[in-house]
Amino acid sequence: MRWLAGLGTATLALALPAAALAKGEFHPEEEFELHPWVSMHLGPLDLSINKAVAYLLLGALLTCLLGIVLMRVRIGGAVGRRQTLGEQIYEVAQVQVAEQGLPSKSIGRWFPYVASLMLFIWVVNMLGFIPLPLSDEKWHGLPTLGIYAATASISVTLALALMTFVFTHYEGIRNNGPVGYFKSWIPDVPKVMLPLIVPLEILGQFMRLISLSVRLFANMLAGHMLILTFIGLIFVLENVVLAVVAVPAAAAFYLFEVVIVVTIQAFIFAALSAIYIGSAIEPEH
């Protein structure tokens, strides 16, 4: 574990932007500001390439490579560590995510989505704790190393949640028809209560969208903010002695996020997506 602590401390040091090293000044929230690198607009839509987009593109590429490396194996060959790891990931995605939330008839159709979603979010979350030259800070014209989580942006997590939201209601209507699906939202209550119950049920559907996106966003944002804040105390209070406490505390949060939070949040997002889609396909009556 000593090398992990050393790695965490080194990463934290690399993650500090040049502006944060000014005595008495430190603004961790500035690390999450997105400045356009390539400005693109389609009417009112801002399609500019920024730090979050770069992390998402890199995350998509690494997810594809990870899937190819771990999952594309020869049948009948010697089982190595690579195949074993790939099978373990596949088993978690199938048994713990797809089979727990989706009806049997729909696993083949929606397993690729929830499995890809889990792997993609995990990769993007992990990238948020690796120092990469994708920061907005420059040193002699070159970007400095920094850590940034694309999933700490509400627009990113909301876009992921919107896919699940759309797929959920699409599958509900496709399998039950529009009348049957929307009728399944209404519980068996006296008719006099329907004017109160129906708006609450509709609101509940949209709350799924909000909770799904905010849960991932808030956990990743809070983790990075805590890490940066602990390190920032050294500069805000202008006391190097605080490093004895601040650096180990920040390293502990760093390891906690990398080892536990990153994986749990990817699993929860994929599992809830499977449950929402499955409940729409076979709604409870």
Image (tube, rainbow, N blue to C red):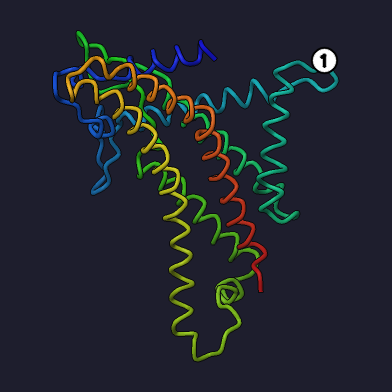
Q: Position of residue 30 (x, y in %)?
A: 22, 32
The residue drawn where x is 58% and y is 57% is 276
Residue 255 falls left or right of residue 39: right
Q: Position of residue 24 (x, y in %)?
A: 14, 23
Depth check: give the residue in front, 264 or 138.
Answer: 264
Q: Is residue 57 above or below residue 153?
A: above
Q: Position of residue 74 (x, y in %)?
A: 78, 20
Residue 32 lies in quadrant: top left
Residue 100 falls left or right of residue 149: right
Depth check: give the residue in front, 33 or 15.
Answer: 15
Q: Is residue 121 above or below residue 244?
A: below
The residue drawn where x is 60% and y is 74% is 184
The residue drawn where x is 63% and y is 61% is 279
Residue 104 lies in quadrant: bottom right
Q: Is residue 172 above or below residue 105?
A: below
Q: How many marks?
A: 1
Q: Is residue 176 above or below residue 268?
A: below
The residue drawn where x is 33% and y is 16% is 244
Point out the image quarter for the C terminus. Answer: bottom right
Depth check: give the residue in front, 207 or 54.
Answer: 207
Residue pointed to by mark 1? 78
Residue 63 falls left or right of residue 210: right
Point out the image quarter for the N terminus. Answer: top right
- Label 1 sits on what residue type? Ala
| Residue count near mark 1 (Cα–Cα under 10 Å), binned few <14, some 14–19, many ≥20 | few
Residue reaching furthest top?
140
Q: Position of residue 266 (x, y in %)?
A: 54, 39
Label 1 sits on a secondary structure element that is loop
